[in-house]
Image (cartoon, grey):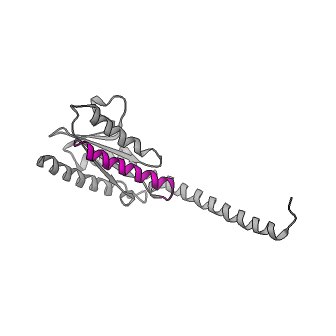
Amino acid sequence: MVNDPELFEKWKKWYEKQQKIRDDQKKRNEELRELSELLREKELAGQLGIKLPSLDWRLQGKPPEMGRQRVDIFGTSKKTGYYVFVEIEKNRPTSIYNVVKAWQYVEDNRQAKPVLLIQVFSPYHFDTGDNKRRLNQTIFIGEQASKTNTKLTYRYLGKEYWPTDEGEGPIKIVDKIALLISDYEKNIKSM
């Protein structure tokens, strides 16, 4: 053991600084977890049904050809039959799998109807470090999937659409999804 009081003080200050960093990150992670719970899939699906009645909306739905995998919120156009997959990415670092799921669906099924995949990311994904890296990878893969298969269109919503308090609800998200679907339908008609 070192009996150098000056060295011990330096170590103690370093250790306290590291502990503060850990405590601050823990607090930030808890705040992000709380924010992620402000958006509830059931409430969002209900609001989508009200705002966009031209689609049939289901919680945990899927196309018949998709096997056992499900989509958080699944919409089917009553008019043309295209699908909307809405994936709510709360605080799990596996958002890329939802892109792969949609991409694989359109690749594996020659009769697949067109799909608009919309990922809604909570503020958790915009934090620094691994969360941000995974977010960027997911968006990159989604955009590449859109380029390689004309039946898949990828869009995402950032943290600016996520509810920031209990009373806000999914209003901003529903409005933005309605705009994305409107643009999507214009593009389908022009094809």
Per the picture, the main secondary structure of the magenta-coloured stretch is: helix
- Number of callouts in the render? 0
* Residue at the far bottom in the pictured view: 6
User: Quarter of the image containing the N terminus?
Assistant: bottom right
Which residue is nearer to you in this view: 128 or 178? Answer: 128
Based on the picture, tell me whether residue 122 belongs to the magenta stretch.
no
* Image location of residue 84, percent across then percent down: 26, 43
* Image location of residue 95, percent across then percent down: 41, 45
Based on the picture, tell me whether residue 140 belongs to the magenta stretch.
yes
Image height check: is 136 above or below 10? above
Q: Residue at x 80, y 68 (%)?
A: 7
Q: Residue at x 34, y 53 (%)?
A: 170
Question: Does residue 124 appear in this view?
Answer: no
* Image location of residue 70, percent across then percent down: 36, 35
Q: Residue at x 27, y 52 (%)?
A: 177
Q: Is residue 132 left or right of residue 191?
A: right
Which residue is nearer to you in this view: 156 or 37? Answer: 156
Range of the magenta residues? 127-150
Q: Residue at x 48, y 53 (%)?
A: 131
Q: Is residue 60 left or right of residue 178?
A: right
* Image location of residue 164, percent across then percent down: 42, 60
Which residue is nearer to you in this view: 6 or 63? Answer: 6
Question: Does residue 182 appear in this view?
Answer: yes
